[in-house]
Amino acid sequence: MTSTYYDEPGRLPPTTETLFDDTARPYFLWWTDTTVGQLKQHLLSSDPEERAYWMGALLREANTRDVWLFVTSDEIRSLWPHLIRYLGRSRQIWAWLLKLPPPEWPPLSEIRGGQSLEVDIVHEPVADIMGPPAPLEGIVIESLTDLRANKLTCILSRSELGDLVDLYFLDRAGFPPELDLEISSQKDSGVDPGVLAWLLAQFPTRPLPAMLESLTSEKLEQFRDALAERFRLSAVK
């Protein structure tokens, strides 16, 4: 967080001088208009979940050499239990870099035998495409349109098997993911069918989570490969 880090032999400088400008919009917060100065305020919030969301975005999206302009390794370690859910596929990288215990995500929990149910709620500062439907048993949920749009952006930002399973059942219900590119671009203007195709082709299909409806890894792998090809075809001329 101090210039002494970058003065040490073998250290690369920050990727861009604009990160020293509080009025600039940092490249790693591409989905929001938040400035460098506003990010610093978020990282100083008294609310640990607010700090975790923005620190998670920093660790997930920024070049590692830019991270130290905003946080220290001790700050990351102290917030780690809150951070894990926001790190996506960078979770294992940061655990390895800071020699932290391998993160377990999602947390192990079962809806059996009277055991508690853990529900993770993540708020993204992006406007809804459509208003939410009526609350379901008192719980406010997103519209199906927003859920479909968000699901594609999840493929870009993390490697959670549940996201691929969701796309499988959406496709089977008559919502081909490749036709949702336009609405997804309203959530993330950087959505790229070519990148989606490449990521999907490498997406894991094992181990499958417990589900209400039967699905084999082999069947999911066939869907993944077919969907990756559909996205590839939509990306090339």
Image: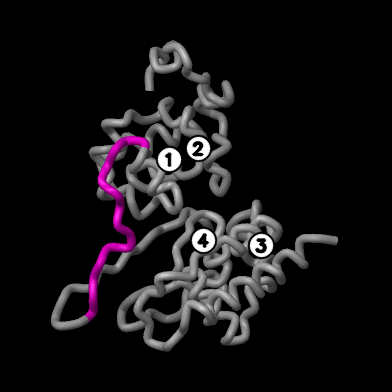
Q: Position of residue 47 (x, y in %)?
A: 27, 45
- Label 3 amino acid? Ala
Q: Which residues are magenta?
A: 97-111
Query: In the picture provided, is 165 more to the left or to the right than 42?
Result: right
Looking at the image, is 80 positioned above or below residue 169? above
Picture residue at 51% right of the left edge, 20% below the top:
12
User: Which residue was labeled with disc 4?
Assistant: 154
The first of marks 3 and 1 along the sequence is 1
Residue 237 image point, x, y percent: 85, 61
Which residue is most to the left?
114
How far apart marks 4 and 3 lie (CA) works out to 13 Å
Tell me the element at label 2: loop
Q: Which residue is mark 1?
A: 59
Of the pair 217 and 110, the residue shown nearer to us: 217
Between tags 2 and 3, which lies in front?
Answer: 3
Q: Which residue is mark 3?
A: 197
Along the viewing direction, whichever of 231 and 225 lies nearer the viewer: 225
Task: Please give the label number shown on residue 62.
Answer: 2
